[in-house]
């Protein structure tokens, strides 16, 4: 309160013979005592203030070098907010059957908030359960049917064995009754050889298709992402996984189009990693040929820079860059230079995923193992066809060999081979590991039914609304009996929960001061709504996303308050970020330090070239931090030195609180009895 304000706060009630001061009634006797004390306080204050100022013979003002506390702060105002808030909404439509909360309740994460009518979802769940039961029965029936078919295959194997025995007997008989019957047929041999070559190529192709069911990586590196899962059907060319080599990184950043004229391929770029502030050198490898417009309507070209990974960078890290003194327009994520797409070379069903994300993999190592009845069947058929072709070649060679056994023996031998081949076919047909189409179809239907069941269970869970965070219910908009309709374009939140484990606010810091702000710095906080109480906070985040307005750029700085006491969300607060502080340090008024850090000290000049006023000598000092009125002296002066000072005019709003601080030896720095404060230029009051 100013002295003028004090005078206006006095009034006298003639009828009751009472005074009112600052809105309070005071009796005459008490007023007399108050007046006497006030006169004493003002007198003592004037004496203390005068004691700090002296005049020399020429009438110059002298100021004594003294010790005090100096604090350099950056200030701002904001509205306080909770640590986090969550608006609860429903993703399903239905009537609210129960509500379990009231405004002001404290809830934990996972607590039930509302229950919606889930009759339809429960019916859908039962339907899905029945579908799974039916699909399971169909699958069991298909397996049973295959088992019955297996008995028929066993009979075929027995019959083939008997045929082999008969062919063997025929061959033995032919040997006994052999007759010479040689003939040549080179044409048949050549034709049979061509057939063998074609069959061999088909077999090789089929074998490669089977081998390709093991999908391998083309490079050594790490798995970036796997796109398939067990049981998934993959077509030829389908993407299986991405493999990357993390020793080389790149980043693609936007630069204002006009600035790219000063950037060339091969230039060195200084990258700054967002979040850590680490600076890494990179090389410009590409400059975009076309300019594009950003969301902020800036015309930019994208410049690509590459660098060796120092070992800690990932694609989740972001960076900004400066090239030849030119800064980029925005930050972007790092990318790996070397990335290999692993693709399927043949169609099949994923049997086993061998590698997961971030696993190491060698060149040629399998990432996924697939299976394919079709590929295996084609391989078997190609093998049988190759055997048939070889047998036909054998027949042709035998027929053309003049030294061969007679045709009866040859034919008997071929028949024996045919019988053995038929036996192999019968054994393959009875293979218990093959799956016919009926079993496969039933298996897929069962899998689909199980997926539908899981979906129905998840949908049913959506009818029970739970708390996503722990906190306090500050708003409750709906209650039991209300109906939620998610088809509307705008739906009011069911309730709002604040996480009050801490408070936070955001202040805008001028570009001139932002370099002084560091994460972890202490912040003093006051609120008009809570007089006489100061709260402590810390700087939690400094955003690089500045906002320019009227030629000045400011940056958002987030402050967190753990012990917020009576502070409530929505309150207006004032904050002081303590950027530097010096306790019990030598100090002088700011305007006592002249250009070149020269202070005029009372005493005899040591040089004729000294331009100090008469009665003073020039002393160069080393200065430190300063506040509005005083500056720290690190060297050059000692406590008690008298220096030439500037007189201060007492402010019109000089307050009783300030006077009380002066009497108690406080002042802005909490010094030992020195007057605190001063005028706007740091002048001492008379």
Image (cartoon, rainbow, N blue to C red):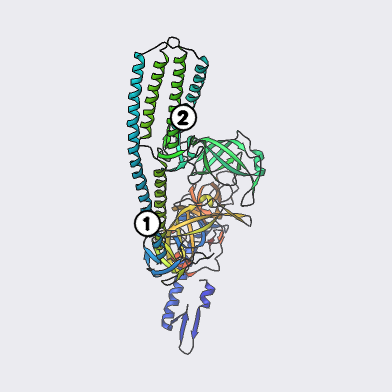
* Residue at (33% x, 34% y) in the render: 155
Q: Determine whether 414 is above or below 228 in the image.
A: above
Q: Which mark is residue 570?
A: none
Front in this rendered view, residue 413 or 149: 413
Location of residue 502 (image quadrant)? bottom left
Q: Nearer the viewer, residue 273 or 221?
A: 221
Image x and y of residue 5, in percent: 53, 74
Image-quadrant location for residue 380: top left
**Farthest residue, direction bottom:** 15
Camera-side residue of 516 and 558: 558
Question: How many numbered markers are drawn?
Answer: 2
In the rendering, at what x and y percent does residue 173 appear?
34, 17
Q: Residue 608 appears in which quarter of the rendering?
A: top right
Asked if residue 381 is positioned above or below residue 191 in the image, the reply reads below
Among numbered discs 1 and 2, the one appearing first in the sequence: 1
Number of residues whose C-alpha sits closer than 10 Å to that of mark 1, classed few (under 14), some (14–19) or many (20 or more): some
Cα distance between the residues tagged 1 and 2: 43 Å
Give the residue at mark 2: 208
User: For numbered disc 2, what is the local secondary structure?
Assistant: helix
Between residues 151 and 390, which one lies in front from this camera angle? 151
SS of the residue under disc 1: helix
Residue drawn at (66%, 44%), measured in percent from left and top? 291
Residue at 51 percent of width and 64 percent of height: 487
- Tell me, yes or no, if residue 372 can be seen here: no
Reply above or below: 123 against 178.
Answer: below
Residue 236 in the image: above or below residue 481: above
Number of the label disc, if any, that sits on residue 130: 1
């Amino acid at each position: 309160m100013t002295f003028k304000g004090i005078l206006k706060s006095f009034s006298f009630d003639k009828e009751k013979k009472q005074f009112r001061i600052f809105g309070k009634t005071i009796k005459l006797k008490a007023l007399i005592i108050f007046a006497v004390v006030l006169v004493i306080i003002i007198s003592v204050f004037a004496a203390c203030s005068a004691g700090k100022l002296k005049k020399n013979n020429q009438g110059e003002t002298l100021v004594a070098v003294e010790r005090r506390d100096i604090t350099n702060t950056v200030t701002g105002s904001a509205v306080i907010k909770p640590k986090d808030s969550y608006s609860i909404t429903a993703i399903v439509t239905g009537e609210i059957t129960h509500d379990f909360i009231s405004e002001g309740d404290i809830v934990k994460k996972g607590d039930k908030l509302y229950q919606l009518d889930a009759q339809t979802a429960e019916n859908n769940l039962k339907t899905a359960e029945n579908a799974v039961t039916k699909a399971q029965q169909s699958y069991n029936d298909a397996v049973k049917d295959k088992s019955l078919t297996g008995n028929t295959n066993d009979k075929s194997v027995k019959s083939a064995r008997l045929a082999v025995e008969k062919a063997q007997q025929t061959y033995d008989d032919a040997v006994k009754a052999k007759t010479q019957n040689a003939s040549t047929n080179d044409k048949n041999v050549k034709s049979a050889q061509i057939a063998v070559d074609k069959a061999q190529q088909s077999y090789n192709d089929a074998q490669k298709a089977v081998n390709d069911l093991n999908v391998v990586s083309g490079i050594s590196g790490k798995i970036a992402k796997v796109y398939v899962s067990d049981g998934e059907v993959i077509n030829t060319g389908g993407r299986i996984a991405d493999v990357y080599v993390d020793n080389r990184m790149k980043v693609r950043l936007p630069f204002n189009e006009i600035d790219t004229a000063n950037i060339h391929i091969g230039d060195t770029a200084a990258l700054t990693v967002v979040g850590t502030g680490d600076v890494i050198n990179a090389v410009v490898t590409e400059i975009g040929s076309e300019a594009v417009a950003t969301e902020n309507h800036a015309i930019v070209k994208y410049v690509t820079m590459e660098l060796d990974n120092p070992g800690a960078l990932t694609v989740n890290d972001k960076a900004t860059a400066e090239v030849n003194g030119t800064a980029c327009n925005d930050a972007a994520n790092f990318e790996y230079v070397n990335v290999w797409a692993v693709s399927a070379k043949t169609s099949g069903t994923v049997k086993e995923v061998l590698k997961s994300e971030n696993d190491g993999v060698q060149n040629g190592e399998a990432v996924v193992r697939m299976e394919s009845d079709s590929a295996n069947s084609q391989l078997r058929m190609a093998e049988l066809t190759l055997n048939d072709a070889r047998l036909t070649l054998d027949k042709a060679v035998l027929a053309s060999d003049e030294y061969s056994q007679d045709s009866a023996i040859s034919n008997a031998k071929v028949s024996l081979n045919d019988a053995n081949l038929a036996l192999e076919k019968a054994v393959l047909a009875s293979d218990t590991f093959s799956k016919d189409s009926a079993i496969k179809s039933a298996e897929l239907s069962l899998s689909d039914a199980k997926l539908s069941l899981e979906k129905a269970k998840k949908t049913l869970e959506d009818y029970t609304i739970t708390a996503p965070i722990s906190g306090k219910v500050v708003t409750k908009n709906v209650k039991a009996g209300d109906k939620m309709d998610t088809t509307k374009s705008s739906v009011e939140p069911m309730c709002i929960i604040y996480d009050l484990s801490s408070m936070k606010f955001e202040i805008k810091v001028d570009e001139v001061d932002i370099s002084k702000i560091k994460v972890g710095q202490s912040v003093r906080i006051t609120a008009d709504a809570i007089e006489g109480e100061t709260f402590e906070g810390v700087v939690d985040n400094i955003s690089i996303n500045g906002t320019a307005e009227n030629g000045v750029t400011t940056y958002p700085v987030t402050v967190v308050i753990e012990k917020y006491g009576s502070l409530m969300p929505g309150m207006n607060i004032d904050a002081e970020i303590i950027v530097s502080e010096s306790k019990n340090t030598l100090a002088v008024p700011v305007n006592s330090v002249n250009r070149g850090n020269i202070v005029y000290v009372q005493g005899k000049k040591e040089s004729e070239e000294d331009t100090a006023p008469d009665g003073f000598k020039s002393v160069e000092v080393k200065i430190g931090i300063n506040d509005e009125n005083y500056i720290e002296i690190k060297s050059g002066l000692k406590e008690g030195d008298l220096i030439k000072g500037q007189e201060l005019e007492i402010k019109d709003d000089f307050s009783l609180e300030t006077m009380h601080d002066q009497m108690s030896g406080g002042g802005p720095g909490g010094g030992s009895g020195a007057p605190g404060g001063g005028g706007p230029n740091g002048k001492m009051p008379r």
